[in-house]
Amino acid sequence: MDRAAQSLDDWLASPKAQRRTRQRIEACGANWAQGPIHRRFDAAMASLPDETPETVAGAISAIFADDTWLDELIDTLAADLAHDSFFEPPFRAMNTDLNRGLIVYEDHRVTIAVGATPIGQLGARKSGPRGATSVNLTGRVAVFKFVKAGGARISLWEAPALGADFSGASAGACLRTGERQLADGDMLVVDGRRQSFVIEHARSSLLILHAEITSGQAPVRAEFDSTSGRYLGCSANSDSASRIQMLTTLLRKLEAPQAFAAIADFLDHEDFFVRWHAMRELLGIDLEAALPHLRRMAARDTHPEPRRAARALLKRIEADLNRKAA
């Protein structure tokens, strides 16, 4: 047995050692939450004159301009890991298609993360079935600082703004507006409601500070094809909308007719895509009971997207019912 395996076996066999590790993790988390860096973040957010995305982005840009706090954080985590090889940073993980990192600060306005983009991961994504031709608008304003830029070259993209009245039929096209060669320390503010960027090439891995601003976010995030600029689809931007969609789908798959009335309540949800998702799940639970709701959506929904989809689906269902009756 090698040394690492033996060390793991010893740790697993020792409740005392595991307790020491947990205590070290908890102490690190408490020290960070109560420490000067976190207090600086709190103070910057508390002193905002307003909570518009632009104001929040300005405060975050000032925090990112002096990133010596990142060195302090890395030194602290490295010291804890040197003392205990089973230590884990007391932060939620951030995992996207490009970044793997840690969320070091969050409140109702912003999430700040430290992430790395491994060069191998970037290459794998670019060679994937859609990765090389996918452009995503997050629906949120974001601030990036490329602490280590890895010699990256990025392409810049812009599309019509994702507003509350967003519709796939009127999404327009996403167009490439230019390129930028990144250097260590460069900062980039991206209005993800209408802008995006794609890492086209890098010589080495990237280390990125990334702040995503939830204030003023669009209701959806959207994906476009970079070759044609064509709109491909959208998804919910809020956690609550995503949870509603997930839970209503689960209830339909569990064949839970008693949940029909609860799901029907979401037909009045403020987000049009949640209303349409709920409608589809109701049809899957009880077609006959859902038809009156579908007719109302086709006639009166305030957003053109579900109204148009409901009309098309209603036409197909009624034609099918007429054929069966004949």
Image (cartoon, grey):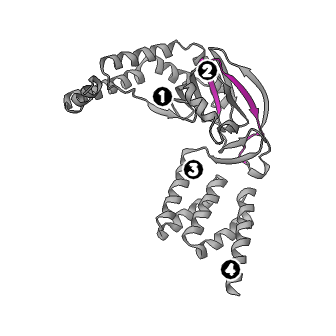
User: Is the residue marked by circle 2 packed among few (<14), some (14-19), or many (20+) residues within 10 Å?
Assistant: many
Task: In this rendered view, identify the residue nearer to me: 125 or 145.
Answer: 125
Task: In this rendered view, identify the residue nearer to me: 75 or 66.
Answer: 75
Question: What's the CA distance linking mark 3 and mark 1?
Answer: 24 Å
**Above or below — where is 284 with respect to 121?**
below
Q: Which residue is mark 4?
A: 321
Between disc 4 and disc 3, the foreground one is 4
Residue 120 visible to an observer of this rendering: yes
**Residue type for callout 2:** Lys
Question: What's the CA distance linking mark 4 and mark 1?
Answer: 54 Å
For marks 3 and 1, the one nearer the N-term is 1
Label disc, if present, on residue 216 of the rendered structure: none
Magenta span of residues: 141-164
Residue 161 spot, x, y in % from top left: 75, 40
**Above or below — where is 46 with respect to 319?**
above
Q: Which residue is mark 2?
A: 145
Task: In this rendered view, identify the residue nearer to me: 226 or 253.
Answer: 226
- Pointers 4 and 3 in contact (C-beta within 8 Å): no
Between disc 3 and disc 1, the foreground one is 1
Q: Which residue is mark 3?
A: 241
Residue 303 visible to an observer of this rendering: no
